[in-house]
Image: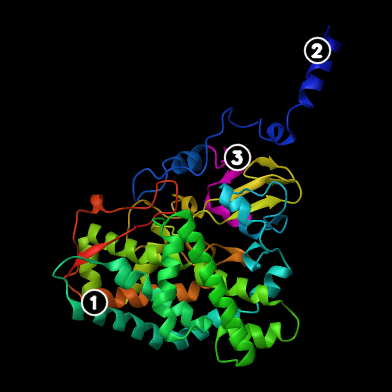
């Protein structure tokens, strides 16, 4: 009888999908992921529980597949630098969070979805334009962009509440990245509108798709123009140093430009809006910032820890079996490393759920992970920091009486299963 029982178990095990067997050692019913934020502005409550009890655990994705979720700071950093893990979305087991993500994974990849050495090779084509040294040379232009947009707002006045996102938070990062790419000034407003349609969530799927294609078509035309007449911009750099030498195809240049155009744009818009809301929630810290605008630097550091604007991008698939957080992760298993949870890790950031612009910054490997970690850390981090610091040095200096025109709980926030953000921010001053 024992032998026949063994045989039945053997037969049963061979009918169970291999991935199901891998994860059977943890909780019986994995929770669905992404989790929902606990409130409009607060991270999912599940993260704190998992950090305390099961820092590497299983979750179920939209299609029923399983992946490992990593929530502690040290483990998230390990995932980010482990060369045994792959960023290539076409590998079996890579954890996509939606049907749209799975479809997008079939597109020709850019450097964010490549492993070494291809990753650094393509990233290196544009990285010099996002170095701290180059961004420092752009700071006068960033300041002028902020000033011009605020001047336009002040000139029109606020007899009725003004949407700060539409008039300021959206155009600031949009105008700057378009300028880096080489978009003529007269096209900035139109392209900003198209980008808003594709990303703001209020357009129909058809409208968003049409706007997406419009941006791709525009960038394709711009590449053609720079082939004929190169200028001092990023697209010209790709054309002269790569396309003309046969190193990349036109489609590569378009996709790299498109990535840089859209990848961080919605995140930057949300971070500006979230920064305003945080200051409304902490009037004593707002008063300090008004008195000393240089506090914008530590304010932005804390903002990028407290609100993780891009919280679902650190995904990998194991190329070989590895050990992580006391768990065995098999080759072909997907891994989601939550920088949002890591940014609230009590072992690294004491009292993590309190916003404190005077938080003592821990140097070295313990910086907040708002921009990721390791070789795939956001290429445009220095640009994003320069923009945010300029915004918060300037906004309340120019508009000291700026107020949100409705109670904060009545604002329209992004859906609870998506990155934290704000859809519209009516203000007066």
Q: Is residue 262 left or right of residue 165?
A: right
Q: In this view, does 154 lie to the left or right of 192?
A: left
Can residue 310 be seen here? The reply is no
Assess whether mark 3 and mark 2 are in contact (beta carbons under 8 angstroms): no
Q: Give neighbour class at mark 3: few <14, some 14-19, many 20+ (Cα, 10 Å).
A: few
**Residue 246, x across and y down, in percent:** 76, 82
Discs 2/1, front: 1
**Residue 120, x across and y down, in percent:** 68, 72
Q: Residue at x 54, y 38 (%)?
A: 54
Point out the stretch of residues depicted in magenta: 54-79
**Looking at the rendering, which quadrant does residue 1 occupy?**
top right
Could you give the CA–CA distance between mark 2 and mark 1, rounded to whole angstroms? 77 Å
**Residue 252, x across and y down, in percent:** 67, 73
Ranked by sequence position, the earlier of labels 2 and 3 is: 2
Q: Which residue is drawn at 64% across and 74% down?
A: 123
Residue at image mark 3: 63
Please check the rendered image and state whether residue 60 is part of the magenta-colored stretch, yes or no: yes
Q: Residue 184 carries which label?
A: none
Give the camera-side residue of 346 and 218. Answer: 218
Please check the rendered image and state whether residue 255 is part of the magenta-colored stretch, yes or no: no
Hey, which residue is sitting farthest right in the picture? 3
Q: Is residue 417 above or below residue 200?
A: above
Residue at image mark 1: 153
Could you give the CA–CA distance between mark 2 and mark 3, rounded to whole angstroms? 33 Å
Residue at image mark 2: 5
**Residue 285, x across and y down, in percent:** 24, 64
């Amino acid at each position: 009888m024992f032998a026949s029982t063994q045989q039945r178990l053997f037969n049963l095990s061979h009918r169970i999908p291999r991935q199901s067997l891998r994860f059977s050692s943890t909780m019986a019913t994995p929770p669905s992921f992404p989790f929902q934020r606990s409130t409009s502005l607060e991270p999912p409550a599940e993260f704190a529980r998992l950090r305390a009890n099961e820092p590497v655990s299983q979750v179920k994705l939209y299609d029923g597949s399983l992946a490992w979720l990593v929530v502690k700071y040290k483990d998230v950093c390990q995932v980010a630098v482990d060369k045994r893990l792959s960023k290539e979305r076409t590998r079996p087991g890579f954890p996509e969070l939606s049907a749209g993500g799975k479809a997008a994974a079939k597109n020709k990849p850019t450097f964010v979805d490549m492993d070494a050495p291809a990753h650094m090779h393509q990233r290196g084509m544009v990285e010099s334009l996002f170095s701290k040294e180059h961004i420092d040379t752009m700071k006068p232009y960033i300041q002028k962009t902020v000033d011009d947009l605020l001047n336009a707002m002040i000139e029109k006045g606020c007899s009725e509440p003004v949407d700060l996102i539409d008039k300021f938070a959206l155009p600031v990062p949009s105008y700057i990245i378009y300028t880096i790419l080489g978009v003529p000034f007269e096209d900035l407003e139109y392209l900003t509108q198209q980008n808003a349609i594709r990303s703001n969530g209020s357009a129909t799927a058809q409208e968003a798709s049409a706007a997406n294609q419009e941006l791709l078509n525009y960038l394709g035309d711009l590449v053609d123009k720079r082939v004929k007449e190169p200028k001092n911009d990023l697209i010209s750099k790709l054309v002269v140093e790569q396309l003309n030498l046969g190193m990349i195809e036109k489609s590569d240049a378009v996709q790299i430009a498109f990535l840089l155009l859209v990848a961080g744009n919605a995140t930057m818009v949300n971070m500006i809006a979230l920064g305003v809301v945080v200051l409304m929630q902490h009037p004593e810290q707002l008063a300090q910032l008004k008195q000393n605008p240089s506090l914008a630097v530590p304010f932005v550091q804390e903002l990028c820890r407290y609100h993780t604007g891009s919280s679902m991008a650190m995904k990998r698939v194991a190329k070989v079996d590895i050990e992580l957080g006391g768990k065995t992760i098999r080759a072909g298993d997907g891994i989601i490393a939550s920088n949002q949870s890591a940014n609230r890790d009590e072992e690294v950031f004491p009292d993590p759920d309190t916003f404190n612009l005077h938080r003592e910054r821990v140097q070295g490997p313990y910086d907040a992970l708002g921009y990721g970690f390791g070789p795939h850390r956001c290429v445009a981090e220095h640009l994003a920091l320069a923009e945010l610091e300029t915004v918060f040095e300037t906004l309340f200096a120019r508009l000291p009486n700026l107020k949100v025109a409705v109670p904060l709980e009545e604002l329209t926030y992004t859906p609870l299963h998506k990155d934290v953000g704000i859809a519209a921010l009516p203000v007066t001053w």
